[in-house]
Amino acid sequence: MSENVIQSDPTQNPRVTWEGCSVLLDVNDGDRLVFARLTAGSTLKIGKKNCSLRPLIGCPFGSLFQVENGAEGLCLSRVIRSMDGNNLQEEGDSKILDESRDNRALVDNNQAQSLTGDDIEEMRRQGAKGNEIIEALIANSATFEKKTQFSQEKYKLKKQKKYAPKVLLRRPVTRR
């Protein structure tokens, strides 16, 4: 019999991460895929900052994390997904509004946003979460309400990727 047989720990749950396991991190819904080994000191670069991967240890595969400001800088915190099925809108009203709106009249001259980069940094220092910053950006945009629904969703997604990036914890498997 071979002496190179790997003994697996029967108490270890294969659905939960452990220190030293390899994971696949899906950043911003497929923007970037990162293969990483979870250790107490491992980090992941998201944007221009490094985040510790320590909070991912002991979490089930498929967990969703969001980058937030913590005591020692940026950290990953687990997001619990809501099971609301109330995302449906009435089709008739939204079609009428979309048909009357048009992006052709909008001019991109960088004057539509009244919130400056310094204001956003101040919000971050005060502990504002990414979603709060996105809502403030939408509220301070002069052209957001004039855009089509598709353009509004595209704008929200772009800002979410910048100010509130998400990381999905996946099990690395080969495709069959």
Image: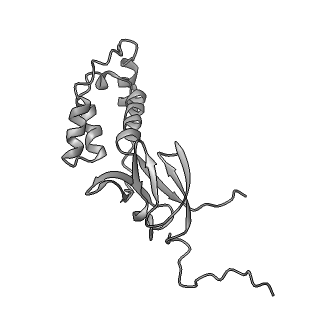
Reply above or below: 14 against 86. Answer: below
At a point 40% along the width and 34% down the height, the residue shown is 153
Callout count: 0
Give the camera-side residue of 16 and 117. 117
Instruction: Tell whether 29 sits left or right of 91.
Output: right
Q: Which of the 4 quarters of the picture holds residue 76?
A: bottom left
Instruction: Point out the residue furthest to the right here.
Output: 1
The C terminus sits in image quarter: bottom right
Q: Quadrant of the N terminus?
A: bottom right
Furthest toward the front, the residue is 41
Rendering quarter of residue 78: bottom left
Above or below, comparing residue 33 to residue 114 in the picture: below
Q: Residue at x 58, y 85 (%)?
A: 10
Image spot of residue 82 (x, y percent): 37, 56
Using the rendered view, name the quadrant where residue 143 is placed: top left
Q: Is residue 58 left or right of residue 129?
A: right
Rendered image coloring scheme: one colour
Q: Is residue 118 or residue 161 the one in the foreground? A: 118
Residue 28 at x, y percent in the picture = 47, 45
Residue in the picture at 36% in, 18% down: 100
In the rendering, at what x and y percent does residue 25 appear? 52, 54
User: Which x, y percent locates residue 12?
Assistant: 53, 80
